């Protein structure tokens, strides 16, 4: 997962660390040369003075041990150089040079421009002008990046908590979830996965086949329902999708079912007529949660889709599918920040168990920065 992004960022951090080590050694070497020249001149002057003073060596007492004065200065000089060799500082010029490369890495891996800018700005504030121990510079940059990415990502919406709170406050009413997205994102399979997830948490569900447009969509949802042992409410193709959702809600009330999961036809985010149909489903069914389902692998397109659905209907959260084959990962990093809507789940395969609740810390660990 996110192979390209994590490899590129990790390599960038290592390269910066190595280059700074090298430049620190070069700077220290130059300083050492200059210091040696200065030291030699001082020695000649001192030697002349010593000859004039009958070659008498002054000694300075330190802790009961006598050290020649010139040796003491020599020791202090080398201690100073050793300290510089062990430390390094990233200047503004350094950051601009290395930063351009990091920004390109982020953009090439589908991180939105706005998010890439945010990361670069925050990172600059954290590391420019700061002095680091050479051996710790890589760790320090990694830690700074991890902390910034964690702040970029929104706190996930806890769907189980939302359902249980609704159940406690109004046990007679089911929790209603409306799913939306464009064609081919794996929305129907995702709904089956959510039903399976709820079942493991001892929460019952009913599936509403409100996709009355796509051929075989009703049969597909019914097949999932049969495999999971979950009821599916449907009507004929061409029926009013809002009516199917309404029937499923009434079925849930009569049978004391906890959650209604409403499937809808995939529609392009640019199709105003189909979006109006979605508005009607929203108005009739009054969902407690509206979830946009999009493919992680489509990069910045999925962000634009989510924004359009949010503007037209309003979404509460996001599920990203196919993250297991997304080698870039930038859309997962960006979508929440741009839309201000949290990621709820990540789809990681085709099996019912292959969906995981989104967790910020675990997501960043997967990047392996």
Image (cartoon, rainbow, N blue to C red):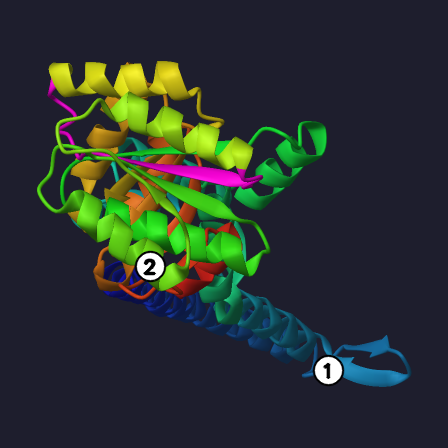
The answer to whether residue 281 is above or below residue 145 is above
The answer to whether residue 152 is above or below residue 362 is above
The C terminus: image quadrant: bottom left
Answer few, some or many: residues within 10 Å of disc 1's Cα (few below 14, many 20 plus, some between 14 and 19).
few
What residue is disc 2 on? 226
Q: Residues under labels 1 and 2: Cα distance? A: 103 Å
Residue 71 position within the rendered picture, expressed as x and y whole percent measured from the top left: 66, 79
Residue 105 position within the rendered picture, expressed as x and y whole percent measured from the top left: 22, 52
Along the line of sight, which residue is nearer the eye, 71 or 48? 71
What residue is disc 1 on? 56
The answer to whether residue 324 is above or below residue 289 is below
**In magenta stretch: residue 262:** yes
Which secondary structure class fits the magenta region best?
loop
Mark 1 or 2 closer to N-term? 1
The N terminus: image quadrant: bottom left
Left or right: residue 152 versus residue 237 is: right
Residue 282, picture quadrant = top left
Q: Nearer the viewer, mark 1 or mark 2?
A: 2
Residue 245 position within the rendered picture, expressed as x and y whole percent measured from the top left: 35, 28
Residue 246, picture quadrant = top left
Report the residue at 39% width, 60% height from top. 228
Boundaries of the magenta span: 255-271
Report the residue at 59% width, 66% height from top. 80
Q: Is mark 2 on a helix, strand or loop?
A: helix
């Amino acid at each position: 997962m996110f192979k390209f992004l994590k490899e590129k960022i990790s390599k960038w951090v290592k390269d910066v660390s190595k280059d700074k080590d090298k430049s620190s050694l070069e700077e220290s070497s130059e300083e050492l040369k200059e210091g040696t020249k200065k030291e030699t001149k001082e020695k000649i002057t001192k030697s002349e003075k010593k000859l004039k003073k009958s070659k008498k060596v002054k000694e300075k007492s330190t802790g009961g041990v006598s050290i020649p004065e010139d040796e003491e200065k020599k020791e202090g000089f080398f201690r100073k150089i050793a300290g510089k060799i062990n430390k390094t500082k990233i200047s503004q010029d350094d950051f601009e040079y290395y930063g351009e490369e990091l920004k390109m890495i982020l953009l090439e891996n589908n991180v939105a421009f706005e998010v890439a800018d945010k990361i670069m700005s925050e990172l600059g504030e954290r590391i420019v002008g700061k002095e680091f121990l050479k051996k710790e510079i890589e760790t320090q940059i990694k830690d700074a990046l991890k902390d910034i990415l964690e702040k970029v990502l929104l706190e996930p919406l806890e769907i189980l908590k939302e359902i249980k709170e609704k159940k406690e406050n109004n046990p007679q009413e089911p929790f209603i979830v409306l799913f939306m997205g464009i064609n081919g994102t794996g929305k129907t399979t995702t709904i089956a996965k959510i039903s399976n997830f709820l079942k493991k948490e001892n929460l019952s569900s009913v599936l509403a086949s409100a996709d009355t447009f796509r051929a075989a969509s009703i049969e597909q949802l019914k097949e999932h329902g049969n495999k999971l042992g979950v009821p599916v409410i449907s009507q004929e193709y061409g029926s009013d999708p809002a009516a199917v959702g309404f029937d499923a809600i009434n079925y849930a009330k009569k049978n004391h079912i906890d959650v209604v999961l409403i499937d809808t036809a995939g529609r392009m985010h640019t199709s105003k007529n189909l979006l109006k149909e979605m508005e009607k489903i929203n108005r009739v069914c009054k969902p407690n949660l509206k979830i946009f389902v999009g493919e992680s692998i489509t990069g910045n397109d999925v962000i634009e889709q989510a924004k359009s659905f949010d503007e037209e209907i309003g979404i509460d959260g996001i599920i990203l599918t196919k993250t297991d084959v997304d080698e870039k990962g930038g859309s997962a990093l960006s979508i929440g920040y741009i839309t201000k809507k949290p990621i709820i789940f990540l789809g990681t395969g085709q099996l019912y168990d292959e969906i995981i609740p989104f967790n910020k810390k675990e997501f960043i660990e997967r990047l392996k920065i």
